[in-house]
Image (tube, rainbow, N blue to C red):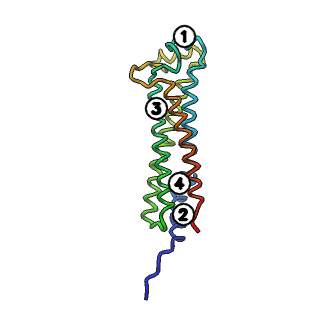
Amino acid sequence: MSEPRPDPTRSVHDYELIRRRHGLSGIVSIPRKIRWCSYLSFVIAASMGALAVLPPSVRKLYLEGEAANQSLGVGLVALFCVGAVVVGAVGLAGVALRRGRAESVSREHAWFLVGLEDVFSGIALITGALGVAAVTTLTVVGFAGTETVERLLAAGIDPYRRLAWAPESGFVALAALGCGVFVFLLAVTTDSSMRWTPG
C-alpha cells in the first residue's frame, strides 16, 4: 500500500493560516508592505529636498551655500534609513519568492518564513518609519522659524549640524528617490508573481 502524497493545497492553507494568526504582520500582504517601504523612501527624498526651500533667514543662518551641497548629520541618518528600507523590502520580496517557488510548505518551514517576514518587516517598517520621523522633523523644523531652531540649539539639538564626512544633501535626496522607485517597482513585480499561479 503506497504512502499518501502530501497535498500542496493543504500546505498552502496551513502557511496562510499560520501567517494570519501570527499577528498584525500577517494581516498586511507582502506586496503592500514593500509598497509602504517605497513611500518611506519618497518621504525621505522630499524631506531632504525641503532644505532647498527653507525660509531665507534659516538658510542664511544655518546653511552655508546651496542646500544640495550641505554635508549634514541628518543626511547620514537619512541614508541609513534608506538602506534599512531597501534591505527590508528586498528581504520581503525574497520571502514571497521563496514561498511562491515551493510546491508545498511544511509547518516548520511556514513558521520559518513567517519569522523571516517579521524580521524584514521590522527592519523596513519600524526602523525605517522611526528614521523617517526623525529625518522629517529635523529637516522641516526650520519652517517654524529661527526662534524654534534656536530653542532646539539651546536644548542641545542641532538639526542642521554639519559633518565633513557626511553625504551631501542633494545626493541623499536623489538616492532616496531612486531607491523609492526601485522598491515601488519591486512591489509591483512581487504582487504580479504572487498572483500568477501555474496551471
* Measured Cα–Cα span from mark 4 to mark 2: 11 Å
* Measured Cα–Cα span from mark 1 to mark 2: 58 Å
Residue 23 marker: 4
| Front one among 196 and 39 | 196
Residue at image x 59%, y 12%?
A: 56
Q: Which of pointers 2 and 3 indicates the residue nearer the eye?
A: 3
- SS for callout 4: loop
Whichever of labels 1 and 4 marks the residue nearer the N terminus, that label is: 4
* Measured Cα–Cα span from mark 3 to mark 4: 30 Å
Residue at image x 39%, y 19%?
A: 164
The residue tagged 3 is 79
Amino acid on which disc 3 is placed: Leu
* Measured Cα–Cα span from mark 3 to mark 1: 25 Å
Vertical placement of 135 versus 192: above or below? above
* Measured Cα–Cα span from mark 1 to mark 4: 49 Å
Q: Which of pointers 1 and 4 indicates the residue nearer the eye?
A: 1
The residue tagged 2 is 17
Whichever of labels 3 and 4 marks the residue nearer the N terminus, that label is: 4
Amino acid on which disc 4 is placed: Gly
- SS for callout 1: helix
Residue 60 marker: 1
